[in-house]
Image (tube, helix red, strand yellow):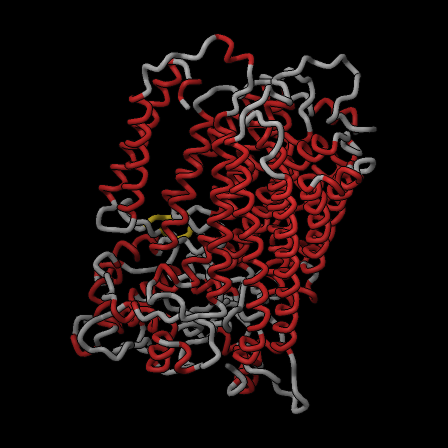
Amino acid sequence: MISQLTKTEREIALLLTILLAISGSILGLMGRGDLLGYHGALLAIAGYALTFVLIKDHFDPEPGPKRIEKYYDDPIKVGIVLAIFWVVIGTFVGDWVAWLLVFPDATFDAGWASFGRLRPVHTSGVIFGFGGNALIATSFHVVQRTTRARLADRVSPWVVIVGFNLFCLMAASGYLMGITASKEYAEPEWYADIFLTIIWVVYFVLYMRTLARREEPHIYVANWYFLAFIIVVAILHILNNLAVPVSFGHAKSYSLFSGVQDAMLQWWYGHNAVAFFLTAGFLGMLYYYLPKRAGRPIFSYRLSIISFWGIVFLYMWAGSHHLHYTALPHWVQTLGMTFSIMLLVPSWASAGNALMTLNGAWGKVRDDATLRFMMVAAVFYGLSTFEGSFMAIRPVNSLSHYTDWTVGHVHAGALGWVAMITFGAIYTLTPWLWNKERMYSNKLIEVHFWLALIGTMIYVFAMWNSGIIQGLMWRAYNENGTLAYSFIESVAAMKPYYVARAIGGFLFFLGAVVCAYNVWKTIQLPAVAAKNPDKPPLPARGSPTALSAAE
Amino acid sequence: MLKNHAKLERTAIGFAFAIMLVASIGGFIEIAPLFTISETVEDAPDMRVYTPLELAGRNIYVREGCYACHSQMVRTLQDEVERYGHYSLAVESKYDHPMLWGSKRTGPDLARLGDKYSDEWHVAHLLNPRAVSPQSVMPAYRWLLRNELKANDMPLHLRAMRKVGVPYTDAMIANATADTYGQANPDSGAADGFFERYGFDSNSRYFDGDKRKVTEMDALVAYLQILGELTDAADQTAGAANLENDAEGATQ
């Protein structure tokens, strides 16, 4: 893997891994009486192991001068493999916790196996482990292809991939041990947050430097989304995680904010993690792989501009719809609701732009499961953004909030949109990256497609039912004017839906396993001459390419 | 507009700055005014801080991820007020770093759980939820009774809380460890001056029923028993008493 690095780059990499080993050791020593010690040890072991690899191969022959004529894809391959690793782990743990609600005693009397500790392993595993690795990998791929520039250097992509996955490991292992800041989707503690901030700055700088080297005059729309994803996630992450650690030897910290401010910041973060991690980044993916796979230009350049700036501007107001009827000032709730409804415009503009792009390629959608993954993703994107705007309306929210309806909504987005577009991108990208004629088995893609779609449908329908029943039972009155149901009756009523949800989740997990197997077998196929040649010559000015807009 | 945008697309740094600017507006307008909230929200002069034992219990609540299934935020809806008690006031979570309002009720809201059940009920429920509530889907937390509570670093915890704005006094910080053990072991005399520091209506009991050691169960139950009890602000709001009376019997 380091054969692509020049001598200087190997030395920089060595310096960084030694730095990682030393800082891990220091953290481990400072936290030796605390759970923090384990994470210090984790970083130190990773640092020493990487240092060993770099020293072992240090004197391998250097790459020739031809290296700069090709795109740099090695870190992308690793990112794709890691994304698949995390989706299998993440959906497995997700289905596990789903079954825990059916069989609550299946915890082996151990803290790590209880719902509260496993649940963030699932959420972080799928959002950051799967989603994050997929975004990082595809952003590296897309930015090179759409700028016709090689990644700006060959060390920082590795810093991003390795560092980000160390963060994911710290997150997941920490929850099991009981390390959590309890902020939903931002559970890792202060030291992991600082670590991620450093990694993210490296990512941003690398992305900007690569854009700066572009040979295309214009920055293609997919890169706008990736850029928004990188920048805004940094802002959200830093502000929401401000905290004072108990000491530098403790994993535990106390949030800088409390009560209302903390709640507002948390859901400003939480909802925009949906917007900029789970939407903007994946729209970046969609804007490249969908037109490429369909062989059709993006339907409308104008729509893509409107929807991009609409999403960047409007989403940041919407977080307070998570706090309807709470102690948050009413005017903030109202603003959140209003902007959430307005969000439907750019969201449907994006979904519509994607679907209209498929006009003229519907035959391909029928025959090609990979493209169908992306089409269904766009449909689910449209459906779940509509549902989201609807649920943000205050009276609707009074019914849906705190119930499984929210869980169903999130999974319509996460399974139907985020995961499906990613699987589409993975099936498109894998043969290109590894220079294969095609995926190992198109049949298995077809199997995966139906497992994923049926699994998602079962899941979402189960949660719609349970959520609405819960909400209605909580607010039902009998003829005496008193509450009709005790809380526990509403819990008991959920049982069939919890079983159905766990079955739907299992089908989705099976699909992920099929995907892993298919990609694994594809990597082992004999390589062919690249079908998607590196750095094609610049098209003559004004001539349309696959990605230029139709209008 | 399209022409200008075509220009913007040609500069990476300009585009990055445009994203930062456009994305900052909403957050700024909604969040910045909340930091002046102390001027608009009713104050609660009687509000006390968490005792070290309760804070340790709160940290266990966080560690076990209880917030994933239990909210601590009664909304201003009739059925919620009848089920759980007076709707939550902003001031009631002003010492909550972080807040635990939650987002999901797989189990019921806990904002006003304090003093609703006996300590024995809580211990029995945490050891085996289905023993007291056959249809419950909550996991059992038996290790809480096995694990002795680590409290030697409680002064550091209180100091960190003071740094983020909770008014712990020097005496509270200095006595934090002794107060932790003393509150759960009232006959030991370890917590000399505990009531002077935290108020005479704070609880000091053998929360887990075991007089020999102070466990994580002691801390968690101590915390659960003061949920909603740090201030009487909610009770003083007009009409609250009636609603709370109605709520008796309707809960759970």
- Direction from residue A86 to residue A22 in the image, left or right: left
Asked whether A277 or A235 is in front, the reply is A277
Asked whether A467 or A85 is in front, the reply is A85
Q: Quick check: can you spot residue A336?
A: yes
- Count how many numbered circles sit on residues in the image: 0
Q: Quick check: can you spot residue A235?
A: no
Whether residue A489 is situated above or below residue B40 in the rendered picture: below
Please identify the quarter of the rendering in which residue B183 is found: bottom left
Please identify the quarter of the rendering in which residue A286 is found: top right
Q: Who's the residue at 58% across and 70% down the image?
A: B75
Please identify the quarter of the rendering in which residue B10 is found: top right
Q: Who's the residue at 28% across and 46% down the image?
A: A38
Q: Who's the residue at 28% across and 76% down the image?
A: B208
Q: Position of residue B244 (x, y in %)?
A: 53, 83
Extreme residue toward the top, this view: A65
Whether residue B61 is situated above or below residue A237 in the rendered picture: below
**Which quadrant of the figure contains the C terminus of chain A?**
top right
Q: Position of residue A499 (x, y in %)?
A: 55, 68
Q: Position of residue A266 (x, y in %)?
A: 52, 52
Q: Position of residue A132 (x, y in %)?
A: 52, 40
- Direction from residue A176 to residue B149 in the image, left or right: left
**Which quadrant of the figure contains the N terminus of chain A?**
top left
Asked whether A223 or B49 is in front, the reply is A223
